[in-house]
Image: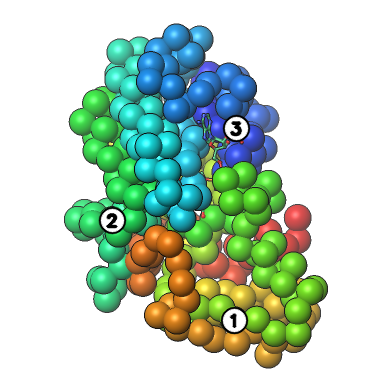
Amino acid sequence: MAKIVILGSNGQLGSDLRKVLAPHHDLINSTSQDIDAAAMDVSSQLAPYADAKYIINCIATTNVDGCESNPQQAFLVNSAFTLQLAQFCTFNQITLIHISTDYVFDGTKLGEYLESDMPNPLNVYGLSKYAGEIAVQNYANKYFILRVSSLFGIAGASGKGGNFVTTMLRLASEKDSWNVISDQLTCPTHTLDVARAIDILIAKEVSEYGVYNCVSSSSCSWFEFTEEILRQTGQDINKVKPISYKDYTFKALRPQYAILSSAKIAQYYTMPDYKSALSEYLSL
Ligand SMILES: NC(=O)c1ccc[n+]([C@@H]2O[C@H](COP(=O)([O-])OP(=O)(O)OC[C@H]3O[C@@H](n4cnc5c(N)ncnc54)[C@H](OP(=O)(O)O)[C@@H]3O)[C@@H](O)[C@H]2O)c1
């Protein structure tokens, strides 16, 4: 049994990782009670994990608009902490599985983003996560960077107070109609599938390190995703109305076509299409 540490184990992805990995691994769950990732020096906080075989880093400041107002927190947690973690893993010969984001891209590619495409983040969150990736690539010996997108999981994102699915279901119960963006594309991804992909990388002791996109194998607009949520929960899909992202005011700019290819991770785990992933999530 490999000793595995999950950093951010109470978060949305961390919670599903606990579920998937706990039955067959010696699991150490680490929360913000154990580590303050915004601290300037985290070496003493990481020290208890020196004998781990894998560390999975789910810690992040995830509130995209919040990062615009508090870049210091974003860079401390998403970049500086990641750099210290990468150095710690190399020193202790630990394999680092680090979670990153589609927001490292600017969303101008009219096709699927490959792992080899050049990042060009549009906002502070994306920039801080990209800096985290650079730190891992430069300071970790054995690492996987998994780029995930538009996560939904039973625990809900702690940094966002829920997930998109729960928000749409709440709006459906409260309103006769509401607007959702129809010209911004993403790959909505169930955290349980990301956890399963990680489980396989560990079980197979994969050593082809590097960057992997780890998203659902199909994409949609937020509007189409909402229609699918309503359809699968037996509600009136006409309640949701399309709106352009140009008519929606966000503090942070967001990529318009954030579609990632899941072909590379498919050699180990086939990510489902977003409709099947949603269907499984709603059945839990
Ligand atoms: N959610 C999305 O749609 C999305 C999209 C693309 C990429 N991602 C990436 O996926 C990963 C997981 O996201 P998620 O949705 O699971 O997020 P989440 O639920 O917000 O989890 C983030 C975790 O980070 C921990 N954390 C935050 N600040 C911390 C600090 N200063 N010290 C210690 N721990 C801290 C939180 O701990 P506590 O709960 O104990 O506070 C929480 O467990 C992140 O790397 C994120 O950037 C997410």
Q: Identify the amino acid type marked 1.
A: Asn
Q: Of the residues under marks 1 and 3, which one precedes in the sequence?
A: 3
Label 2 crowd bin: few (<14), some (14–19), many (20+), radius 10 Å: many
- The residue located at (19%, 56%) in the rendering is 118
| On screen, residue 246 above or below 127 | below
- Identify the secondary structure beneath mark 3: loop
| On screen, residue 265 above or below 35 | below
| On screen, residue 59 above or below 47 | below
Q: Nearer the viewer, residue 19 or 267?
A: 19
View extreme (front): residue: 69
Q: Is mark 3 within 8 Å of ligand 1?
A: yes
Q: Of the residues under marks 3 and 2, which one precedes in the sequence?
A: 3
Q: Identify the amino acid type marked 2.
A: Pro
Q: Nearer the viewer, residue 101 or 241?
A: 241
Picture coordinates of residue 215, whole percent (x, y):
45, 57
- The residue located at (64%, 39%) in the rendering is 15
Picture coordinates of residue 235, whole percent (x, y):
77, 81
Label 3 crowd bin: few (<14), some (14–19), many (20+), radius 10 Å: many
- Identify the secondary structure beneath mark 1: strand
Q: Which mark is residue 121?
A: 2
Q: Disc 1 versus disc 3: distance between alpha carbons?
A: 33 Å
Q: Which mark is residue 179?
A: 1
Q: Quadrant of residue 88?
A: top left
Label 1 crowd bin: few (<14), some (14–19), many (20+), radius 10 Å: some
Q: Is mark 1 within 8 Å of ligand 1?
A: no
Query: In the image, which is nearer the foreground, mark 3 or mark 2?
Result: 2
Residue indicated by mark 3: 9
Picture coordinates of residue 228, whole percent (x, y):
63, 77
Q: Identify the amino acid type marked 3.
A: Ser
Q: Which mark is residue 260?
A: none
